[in-house]
Image (spheres, helix red, strand yellow):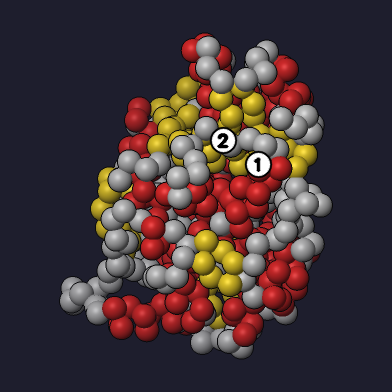
Amino acid sequence: MSDKTRFGLDETRIPEAWYNVIPDLKTPLAPPKAFAPDGTELTMDQIGERLAMLFPAECIKQEMSPERYIDIPGAVIDVYKTYRPSPLLRAKALERVLGLPEGIKIFYKYEGVSPAGSHKPNTAIPQAYYNKQEGITKLSTETGAGQWGSALAIAGALFGIDVEVFMVKVSYEQKPYRRILMETYGGTVHASPTSLTDAGRHVLAMDPDSTGSLGIAISEACEVAIKDPGTHYALGSVLNHVCIHQSIIGLEAIEQMALAEEEPDVVIACIGGGSNFAGLAFPYYRRKLDGKSNARLVAVEPKACPTLTAGEYRYDLGDEAGMTPQLLMYTLGHDFVPAGIHAGGLRYHGDSPLVSSLVHDGEVEAVAVDQTACFAAAVQFARAEGILPAPESSHAILAAINEAKAAQAAGEDKVILFNLSGHGHFDLAAYAQYNAGELRDFDFAAGATLHEAE
């Protein structure tokens, strides 16, 4: 086996097609539902007309596409080349710190090398491209921790499209440098909920001190798009076309793991809406169907917003105000406002219908973890590997460490692969809180009771 720690930077090609998991689902994907004001259920054609107010035709086509592989436009690949293929590394220093035997190996796919510092440009770039092709001049969107807003602001600048971002208020206040990054790339950023939209004013009337949620911010961004024919809405997670674009992560990882002469026994990623988890895990799901892998696929979410582990599997809206169609997914309720954890990208009430379907069918495992334990794992990782993880990514790190320790206790060999979905350079206020012992855990199961960090 190879002793190298880095794989595929010069040897791995950028895939020419994304992978679409839809035709490989055990249970056919449930269609979206939408209703008129009088309660009448809309037809798929009527839903399509509504979606056309929000998304470009190519993204709508990809939403229910039966094609297993979808060609990546050349113009998108040209931009991908500025940071892809992203590196796959073996965490040998972390393995030594953990005292692991040689038979337990930890690998990670590092998406923090993108201009936005996360995996989000993988879909922001094609979405901006498809909108530009349709003559759209402006994109509206929401963002939690700011990775998605940053990625779309960059993509908008590259393709000459204005970008307006509704940033969840608690993250807007926690992460000012993300806002500055978006503004530097030309984006306009608001702390959501705002008084600029009907949806925002409705929330503020009920709770003037609302810290916001992704569901609320989505409502505001959708409203802006619906009211302006020159504006479309762009979403950074959850929807099928987003998961398709992110599959480039796993497609690269499969080739890079082959260069490492290893096959993972477990594939791990954090999950909020599902994009980075789908990006790494879905190509491995296809690999399992081909009989080339037996890997367990593990999605890791925060206990403060445990959608997959505590939510209901049912149809629900994607936003707070009811502007989006209803999707069959695991959900905590579209009006749920999660606690203000620092992993802002994981504070979404629902999950990708594709991920939810695989969880429901027993093809994907889900675990929920505490915020303080994640930061402890992130600091341990940073001191060993030299990369400061995003709070979201720390959930995957913790799960990988737990898998390694469990294998060691059982005397088993194990190859672990996780997605390090972004760096934490804009999250230093969160690390400052953790270092000072001021960070707290929020437990949904305990009614969001606060627990002092030990």
Q: In the image, residue 385 lies at what x, y percent?
A: 76, 29
Residue at left offset 33%, top offset 37%: 310
Q: What residue is pinned by disc 2?
A: 264
Quarter placement of the N terminus: top right
Q: What residue is pinned by disc 1?
A: 257
**Compared to 335, does 106 lie above or below?**
above
Residue at left offset 29%, top offset 61%: 28
Tell which residue pokes out farthest to the right in this image.
10
Judge from the rendering whether residue 222 lies leftward or rightward of residue 48; answer left or right.
right
Quarter placement of the C terminus: top right
Tell me the distance, in whole angstroms, between the alpha carbons under discs 2 and 1: 8 Å
Question: In this view of the protein, can residue 193 be seen by the observer?
Answer: no
Q: Residues within 10 Å of mark 1 (few under 14, many from 20)?
A: many
Pointer 2 and pointer 1: residues touching (CB < 8 Å)? yes
Residue at left offset 69%, top offset 21%: 95
**Compared to 454, does 392 lie above or below?**
below
The amino acid type, in three-letter code, at marker 1 is Met
Q: Tell which of 20 and 128 is nearer to you.
A: 20
